[in-house]
């Protein structure tokens, strides 16, 4: 299992979202509060952001808490759209930087919080790693993000034990799904945060119901149930 966070709004530093919050991804890497599976997220991390329309990434296979180089640079990294994640590797999966989210097709940044049986996913020549999340990301990119909800429902039907919380952004839009794990949203004056769990105790955080699609454009947040959900 993993934890992830997305930001869409005014320019913000990576440090302010990932490192500085009292229960942000840095703390979630060793002491998550709402994680349903696993106790730590020490098998890598990644941060992606858009720089004048170009997706840029910094990923590592090391624990986030041990990367002093990132901590020194993160305050200087600013963007209007950020996707970050810390990883807890599925048993048997390799621990390598290319297995850490966010994955990218050049236009989108995508993180997968969950697990899926690789046998239900098609082989891919474009997947960045052999891990389940990379194969799932490649499938989502191939199908297109406008079909994200349908793709998640299809994969969930093929693997009933899958957990398929997806978070993706392209610089002007964020999309997310809840399927088996937690996701919360915070509407701030300067933007919108989507996160596996709240990074502070602000009462304005709202939990997204399971098996829903979240679509964020500007300050507008739209929720819709995924097919087959009650």
Image (spheres, rainbow, N blue to C red):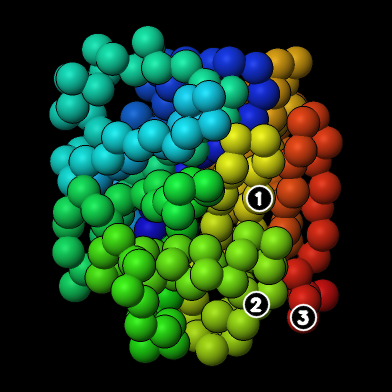
Q: Earlier in the sequence, mark 2 or mark 3?
A: 2
Which residue is rendered at x = 69% and y = 29% of the image? Answer: 192
Residue 132 higher or lower than 74, as above or below:
below
Q: Are marks 2 and 3 in contact (CB under 8 Å)?
A: yes
Which residue is rendered at x = 64% and y = 30% of the image? Answer: 8
Q: Nearer the viewer, residue 4 or 33?
A: 4
Q: Is residue 42 left or right of residue 39?
A: left
- Inspect this view and state whether residue 111 appears: no
SS under mark 1: strand
Task: Report which residue position mark 2 lands on.
Answer: 153
Alpha carbon distance from label 1 to label 3: 19 Å
Q: Which mark is residue 175?
A: 1
Alpha carbon distance from label 1 to label 2: 15 Å
Q: Nearer the viewer, residue 107 or 213?
A: 107
Q: Is residue 142 left or right of residue 68?
A: right
Q: Which mark is residue 154?
A: none
Which residue is rendered at x = 60% and y = 86% of the image? Answer: 157
């Amino acid at each position: 299992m993993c934890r992830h966070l997305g930001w869409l709004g005014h320019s913000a530093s990576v440090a302010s979202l990932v490192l500085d919050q009292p229960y942000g991804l840095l703390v979630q890497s060793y002491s998550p509060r709402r994680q349903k599976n696993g106790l730590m997220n020490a098998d890598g991390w990644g941060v992606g952001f858009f720089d004048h329309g170009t997706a840029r990434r910094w990923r590592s296979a090391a624990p986030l808490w041990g990367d002093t180089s990132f901590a020194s640079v993160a305050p200087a990294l600013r963007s209007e759209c950020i996707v970050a994640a810390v990883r807890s590797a599925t048993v048997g999966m390799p621990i390598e930087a290319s297995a850490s989210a966010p994955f990218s097709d050049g236009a989108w940044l995508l993180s997968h919080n969950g697990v899926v049986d690789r046998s239900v996913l098609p082989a891919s020549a474009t997947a960045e790693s052999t891990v389940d999340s990379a194969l799932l990301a490649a499938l989502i990119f191939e199908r297109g993000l406008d079909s994200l909800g349908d793709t998640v429902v299809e994969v969930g039907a093929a693997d009933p034990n899958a957990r398929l919380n997806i978070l993706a952004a392209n610089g002007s839009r964020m999309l997310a799904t809840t399927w088996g794990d937690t996701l919360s949203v915070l509407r701030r004056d300067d933007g919108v945060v989507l996160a596996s769990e709240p990074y502070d105790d602000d009462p304005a955080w709202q939990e997204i119901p399971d098996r829903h699609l979240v679509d964020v454009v500007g300050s507008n947040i739209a929720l819709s149930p995924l097919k087959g959900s009650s």
